[in-house]
Amino acid sequence: MAKIRRLTPQHPGMFRARVLRGERVTPSMHRLTVTGEDLAGFPWQGFDHWFRLFLQLPHQQRLRLPEFTGDRWWQPYLAIPEAERPHCANYSVADFRPESAELDIDFVVHRDHTGEIEGRAAVWACRARPGDALAVLDQGILFDCPSDASEVIVVADETGLPAAVNILRSLPRGTVGRLIQEVPTADDRRALDAPAGMAVSWVVREDAGSVPGTAALHELLRLRSADGAGYAFVVGESTLATEGRRHLHRLGLPKERITFSGFWKHETARAA
């Protein structure tokens, strides 16, 4: 994950929760709604608010979490014996309802050549039942748009869709710019609450065997100009993030006005 600046809380909160319900919202996205008394105090900021998701291992009777202070959670996490260490993965908030302490998490459903779901978190989510334990560690937001930005460009593959959806609905209504959003199938498209000046380009991946993010990158490479006073947010598979940033910088957008983050890397991330 690469970023110029990070708006991470100095004292991130850990919030225990339990599964309330699950549903397949599109062919490639499975949503879990989780709740818990702790979540009533979740400091929701909108935009691409993200968190570390901790999952109980199948053989465990109780979810074990690292004990830490400040923002140094990684070493305490690694200090937990491997047989007891919870699985950890990064996710964006799909939606949050503070009045009911409900948080939605969208899991991308990828399948291997045999049709089996890939990825430990996705497998867990699709099998989850009401009452299953989990925890989220608040990590703040990556989206860092300057107040004087003349336009906003957002580019993502399906792993960045929850972030893109919330960024668009969090933007000032007078914002102008463009979203390039790649999805696996046409039925993965959804209605968006976007400012009128934000053009939305859904890029449907026609080849099921192609690397996610490639189609969105090709669409971005068709862009021949970018306002140097604008801002861009490019996330998803690592090649999309890095090559997208290079292209936008070549077009004249300063590096400090580009947030890019490789959420995963082809051939290695699906084991996460």
Image (cartoon, rainbow, N blue to C red):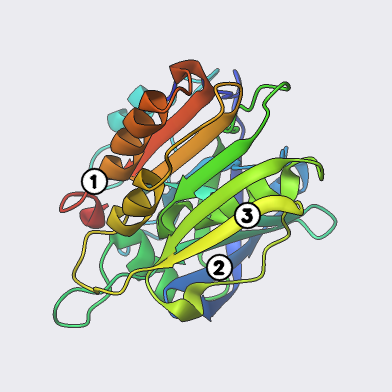
Q: Residues within 10 Å of mark 1 (few under 14, many from 20)?
A: some
The answer to whether marks 2 and 1 mark residues whose Cβ atoms lie closer than 8 Å is no
Q: Residues within 10 Å of mark 2 (few under 14, many from 20)?
A: many
Q: Give the residue pinned by disc 3.
A: 199
Distance from disc 2 to disc 3, alpha carbons, whole Å, reads 29 Å
Residue type highlighted by circle 3 = Ala
Which numbered dot is residue 265?
A: 1
Residue 263, located in which quarter of the rendered image? top left
The answer to whether marks 2 and 3 mark residues whose Cβ atoms lie closer than 8 Å is no
Residue type highlighted by circle 1 = Lys
Q: Residue at x 53, y 72 (%)?
A: 189
Q: Nearer the viewer, mark 2 or mark 3?
A: 3
Viewer-proximal residue, 134 or 243? 243
Q: Residue at x 81, y 41 (%)?
A: 174
Residue 66 seen in render: yes
Residue type highlighted by circle 2 = Leu
Residue 168 place in picture, x, y as percent = 67, 49
Q: Give the residue pinned by disc 2.
A: 32
